[in-house]
Image (cartoon, helix red, strand yellow):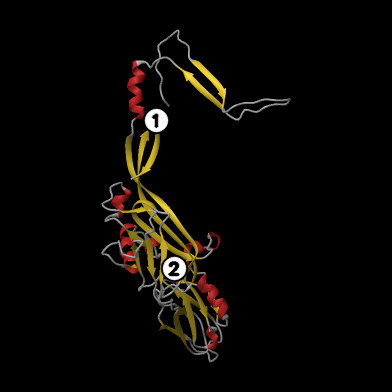
Amino acid sequence: MLEWYADPSSVDFLIDLWPTGNVIVSGSGTFTVSGIDVLIKAPLFHSMDEALLPRLYAEAKLSNYLDPVPIPLTSTTLTASATNTFILNQLVGKATHGVMMIRAAGASATTSGWMTMYNVGASATIDIQSPGGTSIWGGGGPMPVSYLMREWWCENFPSSFSCNKPFITLPLTGNIQKAYKGSPDGFMEFKGDSKKLVLNLGPAPTAEVQTFTVTGTAASGYYRLSFRGEYTQPLAYSASASAMQTAFNALKSAQARSITVVFNQALSAGTFTGTFTCPETGAMPDLVMVDCMNLLTSAPAGVSVSTAVTTPGVAGIATGTYDIYLYFWVMRMAMCQYGRITTKLL
């Protein structure tokens, strides 16, 4: 709001109003004016007005801040053991860092799909290149994604939730936390000039298989599956394989890591296997154990179950269609200009 100082004066303010454009009327009917121009003729400024206006109309810097720029890559095909390239023409400004997340195509919050992210695997690398294909990032070559996930992400965003998720950080400054405070110590400038993000993927993932060796044939009683200190509800000795996997998949400790299992047969049938899909980790963080509770054979005699990994899980991206969420944070400056707050790219 611009204050106005004016002494009592006999001089009038003159206001002229006229239609925008020409108005031509012919015949009968009602004509419509779509716009009005207004001209206000006023006396000279008071001396206090002359002192105030330069301050209000001057550009005054308030603060630097980071503005996220989303680059959605929905329904994008990723190919295992291949180079996957994305052009960054949508990005303009001095960026301090980026973050990449990979989800299933069409994932939604209603099915907890947004909670599931895909780990690209230990052998994957990522790079930022010039339009001609020359690396312009870091040490002049691609960087291991595993390092960017574990070291950079967890160092700057050290929560237990985020460190268990495969967020890929793309650092373009020496200290991301300083950049958030308005004092970046480095950046990479993008001008919509066809710089490229290059993701080199390793082999497709391998599901982990754990084998459960049952000693004795269960004929009565109940048992529970346990994972990372959490137990399922008791299952009858004759529970089907589908009932077993439903019970495991309902564990919060499994859901937190987007782990699911398929059992090949029931416990009562003897030795069985569980095939675990772990998109975020590849390998299972722990064995799944069987608490035999009061399981008995027909003799009766006790029943025991041991667990061992027979096929280690390996993280990776299978060839297919995914939704890639890519964000870069660019530097902006907030300022007071012409009596209002505005921003501009640095």
Residue 12 left/right relative to 25: left
The alpha-carbon separation of the residues under discs 1 and 2 comes to: 48 Å
Residue 196 occupies quadrant: bottom left
State the image coordinates of residue 195 (x, y, percent, origin top left). Answer: 37, 59
State the image coordinates of residue 325 (x, y, percent, origin top left). Answer: 45, 60
- The quarter in which the N terminus is drawn is top left
Residue drawn at the location 33% of the way across and 49% of the way down: 180
Q: Is residue 151 above or below residue 285?
A: above
Please rate how many residues cluster around mark 1, counting C-alpha atoms within 10 Å: few if below 14, some from 14 to 19, many from 20.
some
For the question of whether residue 312 can be seen, the reply is yes
**Which of these two is toward me, 304 or 95?**
95
From the image, tell me which residue sits under label 1: 339
- Helix or strand or loop: what does disc 1 sit on? loop
**What amino acid does circle 2 point to?**
Tyr
Residue drawn at the location 53% of the way across and 59% of the way down: 109
From the image, tell me which residue sits under label 2: 118
- Helix or strand or loop: what does disc 2 sit on? loop
Q: How many marks?
A: 2
Please rate how many residues cluster around mark 2, counting C-alpha atoms within 10 Å: few if below 14, some from 14 to 19, many from 20.
many
State the image coordinates of residue 125 (x, y, percent, origin top left). Answer: 35, 69
**What amino acid does circle 1 point to?**
Gly
- The quarter in which the C terminus is drawn is top left
**Which of these two is toward me, 8 or 222?**
8
Residue 219 left/right relative to 145: right
Question: Which label belongs to residue 41?
Answer: none
For the question of whether residue 292 can be seen, the reply is no
State the image coordinates of residue 292 (x, y, percent, origin top left). Answer: 48, 81
Residue drawn at the location 38% of the way across and 66% of the way down: 198
**Which of these two is toward me, 108 or 202?**
202
Q: Nearer the viewer, mark 1 or mark 2?
A: 1
**Which of these two is toward me, 55 or 13?**
13
Q: Earlier in the sequence, mark 1 or mark 2?
A: 2
